Structures are given as structure tokens and as C-alpha cells.
């Protein structure tokens, strides 16, 4: 790890503590890990899953509950995949691990027409193999390395292209109904994880199957959010809070809220019609150093929405 100055060391320690704290908060908020759990950590070779394993290994030492970790990588037989990297890295950590070899690459290339997105089929095949492996390993939870931006990107993908108000939940039941899937990094910022991975010098393995495909819908959404984050500091934080603060009575889904039975009661109603009331929103976030910026440490400057330019 290349940290040369005292200032760099201080910043790294703060970054590491922030990621560990936010991961612990997410785990506690959604009861992700319980005493006696055996957690299968899915490693892709990317920055997010490396960071997740690193943080969970640290939390394992200090958590009030006991749990086991087993790292699993699916070798999809992509051309040029460096098969030695993950086994050597995991062996150096002394963590239990399993490498699963399945040639999903050939299946995807055979079934998906040239130029079409491979993500959907690749993801389905990968999920099925990981669910089977979790059963074989006796895992009680499957941990994935998705972070805050992944959750918001999925929200916009479903809104723009699927007509659904749906994101990635921090915790859910797997497609086969047999496992609990958790996302311990749900509260963590992607740029924090990227910086952490860079400083830790994780042996990153690129995905040659999908990483080389241009103009993917998710990349379009990611670019939009990156631009928002630059132009409107605090917007990403505000959007993520919205995902955790839903008002079904102010949407339009009859399955979530029974609009047919609404009747006036003559008394004020909690969460009534405040859609156009004057409200103050924490829209602007500032900090002296972006490396230190996060939702909790930032200076929040309230802005009255009625004072914003049209």
C-alpha cells in the first residue's frame, strides 16, 4: 500500500473507518448478519467485492455476534482470465474460499447475437450457479458487493426502461426462495470504495465479457448521476434518502395504498396533502476536503424549495 505522508495516512484511516462504519450501520439497520451465520462472499475480482470482503473480515473480529466467511469466485472461462490471481490473494488472507469453474462465457457468446447486451443472460446463469454453491457450502447468507450508486442506478434503470419504481434492496430472498441475499455496502459511496481499493492495491480483474460493451444503459445512467454529483453536491445523498423514506399514499399504486377507501374525516391527517407546501430540503452539501465528505460529516445548508429559481 503506497501511503507516503502522514496526511495521506490520516486520510486513509478516515476513509477506512467511514466505510467500516457505514457497512456496520447497514448491517444493523437491516439485520443482515446474525449469530452463527455462514456468509458466502461473492468475489468478482472487482473493487467492490474486494472491499466488501476486506471490511467483513475486519468486522468479524469485533462484531458482537459470531459468523463465518467463505469467499467464492465464479471463473466463467473468459479468454485471458488470470486464474491464479484470486486463489493467491485469498490464500494470503487465510480465508476459506472456493473457486467455481463454469464456462458461462461460451454459452453467452453462443446465445446472444453480436452487438446485443450480454448482461441479462450472464447474470441469470451466474445467479443460478451461486445459489447452488451456497447450498453446497451450507451458507445462510449470500453477500454481494453492490454499493449506494448501484442501488440508485437500478432505480433509474427500472424507471426509465422498465416502468417500475424498483431498486436493489439491501436485503432480499433469492430468486429460488432458499437463501437470503445481503448487500453490506448499501450505504457506501462508490468513489470512496474506488479510492479504498486503489490505496489497498487490490489485484483487480477486469470483466472482458461485458466491460468492453459500449453504450450500455447502466453506463448511461452512471454518467447522468456522475454529472449530477458534480453540478449539484448533495443530490445523490438526497436521492438515496428518498429510497429509504417512501410515502405510498403519495404515489399511485393501488396495491400499496387503497385509494378507493379514502374518506374525509374532518381532522388533520398525518402525511396529508403537502405536495405544494413550503418545505425546507437539505439540498446543498459542502466540506473542506472531498476526501472527508460524507452524508454525516458534511455541512448541510438548508434551502427553501420555494426560493429556488424556476
Image: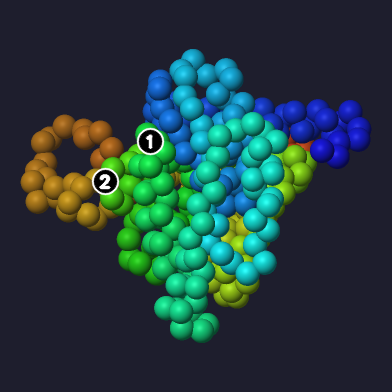
Closer to us: 89 or 235: 89
Disc marking residue 177: 2
Give the distance between the C-alpha atoms of the residues marked 1 and 2, in whole angstroms.
Answer: 15 Å
In depth, the one of 252 and 143 nearer the eye is 143
Q: Position of residue 301 (x, y in %)?
A: 61, 37
**In the depicted structure, whether residue 21 falls above or below residue 53:** above
Judging from the image, what secondary structure is the residue with disc 2 in? loop
Numbered label tally: 2
Residue 186 visible? The answer is: no
Query: Which quadrant is home to the N terminus?
Result: top right
From this view, report whether residue 88 is shown above or below residue 153.
above
Label 1 sits on a secondary structure element that is: loop
Question: Residue 270 in the image: x percent, y percent?
Answer: 25, 33
User: Which quadrant holds residue 214?
Assistant: bottom right
Instruction: Say which mark, if any, is on residue 233.
Output: none
Q: Residue at x 67, y 27 (%)?
A: 17
Q: Residue furthest bottom?
A: 114
Q: Position of residue 241 (x, y in %)?
A: 46, 41
Seen at 28% across and 38% down, the residue is 271
Label 1 sits on residue: 138
The residue positioned 40% from the left and 22% from the top of the image is 36
Amino acid at each position: 500500500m503506497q501511503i507516503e505522508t502522514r496526511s495521506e495516512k490520516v486520510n486513509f484511516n478516515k476513509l477506512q473507518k467511514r466505510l467500516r462504519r457505514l457497512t456496520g450501520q447497514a448491517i444493523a439497520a437491516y439485520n443482515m448478519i446474525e449469530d452463527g451465520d455462514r456468509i458466502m462472499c461473492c468475489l468478482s475480482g472487482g473493487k467492490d467485492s474486494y472491499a466488501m470482503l476486506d471490511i467483513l473480515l475486519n468486522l468479524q473480529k469485533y462484531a458482537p455476534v459470531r459468523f463465518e466467511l467463505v469467499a467464492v469466485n465464479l471463473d466463467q472461462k473468459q479468454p485471458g482470465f488470470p486464474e491464479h490471481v484470486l486463489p493467491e490473494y485469498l490464500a494470503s488472507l487465510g480465508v476459506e474460499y472456493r473457486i467455481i469453474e463454469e464456462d458461462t462465457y461460451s454459452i453467452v457468446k453462443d446465445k446472444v447475437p453480436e452487438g446485443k447486451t450480454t448482461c441479462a443472460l450472464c447474470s441469470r446463469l451466474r445467479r443460478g450457479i451461486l445459489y447452488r454453491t451456497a447450498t453446497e457450502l451450507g451458507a445462510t447468507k449470500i453477500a454481494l458487493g453492490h454499493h449506494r450508486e448501484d442501488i440508485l442506478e437500478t432505480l433509474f434503470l427500472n424507471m426509465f426502461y422498465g416502468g417500475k419504481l424498483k431498486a436493489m434492496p439491501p436485503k432480499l430472498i433469492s430468486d429460488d426462495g432458499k437463501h437470503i441475499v445481503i448487500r453490506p455496502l448499501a450505504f457506501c459511496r462508490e468513489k470512496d470504495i474506488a479510492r479504498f481499493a486503489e490505496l489497498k492495491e487490490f489485484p483487480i480483474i477486469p470483466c472482458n465479457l461485458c466491460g468492453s460493451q459500449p453504450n450500455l444503459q447502466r453506463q448511461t445512467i452512471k454518467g447522468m448521476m456522475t454529472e449530477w454529483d458534480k453540478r449539484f453536491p448533495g443530490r445523490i445523498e438526497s436521492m438515496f434518502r428518498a429510497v429509504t423514506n417512501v410515502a405510498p399514499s403519495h404515489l399511485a399504486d393501488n396495491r400499496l395504498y387503497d385509494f378507493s377507501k379514502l374518506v374525509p374525516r374532518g381532522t388533520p391527517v398525518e402525511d396529508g396533502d403537502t405536495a405544494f407546501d413550503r418545505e425546507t430540503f437539505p439540498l446543498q452539501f459542502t466540506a473542506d476536503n472531498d476526501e472527508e465528505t460524507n452524508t454525516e460529516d458534511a455541512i448541510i445548508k438548508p434551502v427553501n424549495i420555494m426560493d429556488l429559481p424556476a
